[in-house]
Amino acid sequence: MIRPVRAAAFAVAAFAFAASTVVGGPLQAWEGDVAQVENPWFAHVSADPGVGDVGLNDDEAAPAATPRSLGEQVAQHRDSATSGADEECLANAVYFEARGESLEGQLAVAEVVMNRAASGRYPASLCGVVRQPSQFSFVRAGRMPRADRGSDAWRRAVAVARIAKAGSSRVLPGNVLWYHANYVSPGWGRRLAMNSRIGSHIFYN
């Protein structure tokens, strides 16, 4: 008796489901006053959400780019040709004043020239600063000797000049306007505040 009843019940249910599909569409579990979803999930299947759209890593900032070392920057900017008069004058100052120094020492010399040009106390152009009388010993009557353009020292000097102009690395603050070699003791050095020693140079503000 149990099996025929089950078979009949399944038959009735199947018939009711088929009839409802033909007449009124799919069966719905609830016909109450519930707002219908205007944007079904499949409307967004082709969307390309970003990290912010899905709430991932909201509390974590993107990792900062690792700054390149001064040596890496110099390797990138090494060149035998300068881009203009100011870069030429600055590279000459680096070459003749500090080519035997570390890269930091060379950059420090370039920054003193840059600082002077920006200070309002010296000529406003880099060439004006370098050629100013009695300031740089390698300059004679406003003329500079010719550097060895085929040397590694010159290519490094050009790179350091470019880095100094770009401001991508700094070793001295902007108020450092003077320096001298550590084997001399000029009288003006006693009137200034020493900022730092880099290689064989002492820098003042």
Image (cartoon, helix red, strand yellow):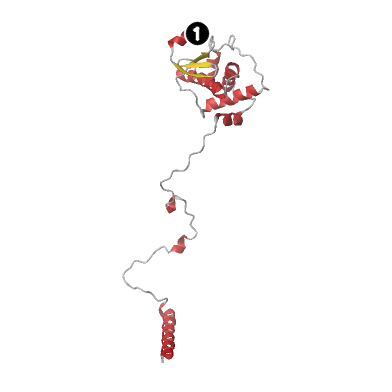
- SS of the residue under disc 1: loop
Residue corresponding to mark 1: 186
Q: In which quarter of the image is residue 16?
A: bottom left
Q: In which quarter of the image is residue 2?
A: bottom left
Residue at the top extreme of this rendering = 187
Q: Which amino acid does label 1 sit on?
A: Pro
Q: In which quarter of the image is the C terminus?
A: top left
Residue at the bottom extreme of this rendering = 1
32 displayed left or right of 13: left
The picture places residue 175, in percent across and down from the top left corner, at 44, 19
The picture places residue 193, in percent across and down from the top left corner, at 43, 15
36 or 95: nearer the viewer: 95
Q: Which residue is drawn at 60% across and 16% down?
A: 96
Q: In which quarter of the image is residue 149?
A: top right
Is residue 74 depicted above or below 31 in this figure? above
Is residue 134 depicted above or below 38 in this figure? above
Q: Residues within 10 Å of mark 1 (few under 14, many from 20)?
A: few
Is residue 24 depicted above or below 49 in this figure? below
176 displayed left or right of 100: left
The picture places residue 71, in percent across and down from the top left corner, at 58, 29
Q: Which residue is drawn at 61% across and 24% down?
A: 156
91 or 65: nearer the viewer: 65
